[in-house]
Image (cartoon, rainbow, N blue to C red):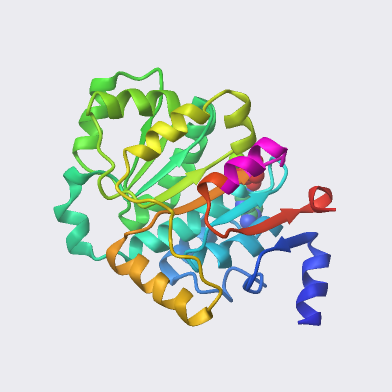
Amino acid sequence: ERDWRIFREDYNIAIKGGRIPNPLRSFVESDIKKDILDVIAKVGYTEPTPIQRQAIPIGLQNRDIIGVAETGSGKTLAFLIPLLVWIQSLPKLARLEDADQGPYALVMAPTRELANQIEEESNKFGVPLGIRTCAVIGGLSREDQGMKLRMGCEIVIATPGRLVDVLENRYLVLNQCTYVVFDEADKMIDMGFEPDVQKILSFMPVSNEKPDTDDAEDEDILKKNFLSKHKYRQTVMFTATMPSAVERMARKYLRRPAYVYIGAIGK
Ligand code: ADP
Ligand code: MG
């Protein structure tokens, strides 16, 4: 325990919330499967960044998380790796049959540029793993995006405004989407996207209202339920700053999240 405290201090990692798993010493010494490790190596990432060290093991536990770290600190991969691992764990058959039921996961970002960057990173890892990513962003034609969506994709990366539009016009359904990422949550709120976020979540068949429990055994049962029936939403939020509006948003949409703060933000 003391060793891990020192380890976290060395990397400026501060945590809040019960039962936070140990941070990663390296990519290789983790539960990340070999095919993903191979892509990490190919891309040339040798060591996880501090936010990746702590957020990845939490994400791999299918737990809600709020990650706070400055711009350029590697937050994209911190949420993408657990997301890809989770999608890989879904039965292949379901993935083939349910293409018309929409994606399994949704990543929301406040701007087109950010959504494009995430799409690029997601494709870098997803393509070799056979996991398809589609972007739903302003600027491209709705029809073209709709066509790509109908061919099936496991992950949708979207800006909230265009996503609402596409959902309301039925170019996309979220009937089996149980994993939601809010990236740059602070910016999302600044740009006034909260009503859109609320609307988007209402298109999903799951809530994050799981029975509250502090019992570890119950937690395990909940996790198994979650994985087998996809009944509950897993929600993760990443942000560079943590103003009270983001805190409120986290309380509203996340369930018993683990908090990870990197650097001076956590002090
Ligand atoms: P943030 O979302 O926190 O602003 P990004 O996820 O965009 O940061 O990452 C910033 C840059 O760092 C990107 O160019 C990305 O490719 C690179 N990067 C991410 N993780 C690692 C890593 N483990 N090792 C080296 N470079 C990394
Ligand atoms: Mg980012």
Task: Name the image quarter holding residue 16.
Answer: bottom right
**185 in the magenta segment:** no
Up the image or down, 201 lies above or below 136; here it is below
Residue 167 pos. (x, y %)? 29, 29
Residue drawn where x is 24% and y is 66% of the image = 91
Q: Which residues are magenta?
A: 239-251
Q: Main secondary structure of the magenta part?
A: helix
Q: Is residue 54 left or right of residue 132?
A: right
Classify the position of the N terminus by image quarter: bottom right
Which one is in front, 106 or 192? 192
The residue drawn where x is 78% and y is 62% is 11
Q: Is residue 188 above or below residue 82?
A: above
Rendering coords of residue 224 (x, y %): 36, 73
Question: Residue 247 magenta-drawn?
Answer: yes
From the top left corner, tell me how far across and down residue 216 is, in percent.
53, 79
Q: Ligand 2 falls in which quarter?
A: top right
